[in-house]
Amino acid sequence: MGSDPMMLPASVDLFWLPLGAGDNTHCVRTNGRLLEAIAAGREHRPRGDLFHAALVVALGDDEWTIEMGPAWGSSEPHLGVVCHGPVGSRWLGRSRYFRYEVRRWRGGTIPDLAEAVDSPRRVSSDAVRAELTLSLAPAFPTATWGRDELGAGEMWNSNSLVAWLLARSGHDLSTIHPPQGGRAPGWSAGLVVAARDSVPSPA
């Protein structure tokens, strides 16, 4: 008789990665800093370091990485892609060069993990929540990256993915924040949409 999968050792770990980590062209980091400077000026606040989030979920002897990445940017043949979404606009998303993909990669790696800050952050060690986090990934709302199509108050991006998954799988996020002095644009959008999704529809 096999063991109950819900009795297996489990963990859900959150990693905070500096925006542009692993980008040798420095394009992402430079553009991110420029946009942050503009946003900080408009909002009359200090500039912050920008971070994007990724998850590593372990269940028994298996481990998965969950993250968002460009649909064209990797040479790996098996990334565990579970869904796609457009970048910039729905029209542009017809091209793979303007699409993102959500990866639930069994045995996968995060290339820039060595640059993570204040990580890993253990979010839970509960097998039920770990299993639910994995099972929800294909249901992620694939709104347009960089836009606010869902009316959540800010752009939709990789931070929205992680926040949505953790909130929908019942994790307590009240003490989860980016590293000190940092910001994670898109995080609150994921929480807002997750809260909507968790409300039962009227009969």
Image (cartoon, rainbow, N blue to C red):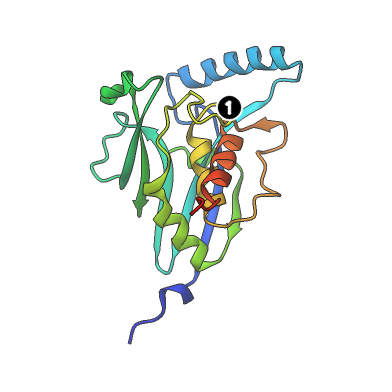
Corner quadrant of residue 43: top right
Say whether residue 105 is left or right of residue 30: left
Going 48% across and 61% down the picture, which residue do you hit?
130
Say whether residue 69 is left or right of residue 157: left
Say whether residue 152 is left or right of residue 99: right
**Does residue 110 appear anywhere in the picture?**
no
**Does residue 188 appear anywhere in the picture?**
yes
On screen, residue 11 above or below 96 = below
On screen, residue 84 above or below 197 = above
On screen, residue 59 above or below 71 = below
Going 58% across and 27% down the picture, which residue do you hit?
154
Residue 135 on image: x %, y %: 40, 56
Corner quadrant of residue 177: top right
Residue 123 on image: x %, y %: 60, 56
Going 49% across and 71% down the picture, which residue do you hit?
9
On screen, residue 83 above or below 200 = above
Check disc 1 and give the amino acid type: Glu
Q: Quadrant of the N terminus?
A: bottom left
Q: Name the residue under label 1.
A: 154
Q: Which residue lies furthest to the front in this view?
A: 203
Going 29% across and 29% down the picture, which residue do you hit?
72
Corner quadrant of residue 36: top right
Residue 178 on image: x %, y %: 65, 38
In the rendered picture of this protein, how many numbered marks are placed on residues? 1
Residue in the foreground of this view, choosing between 91 and 64: 91
Q: Which residue lies furthest to the bottom in this view?
A: 1
Question: How many residues crowd mark 1 within 10 Å: few (<14), some (14–19), many (20+)?
Answer: some
Residue 47 on image: x %, y %: 70, 20
Q: What element carries label 1?
A: loop
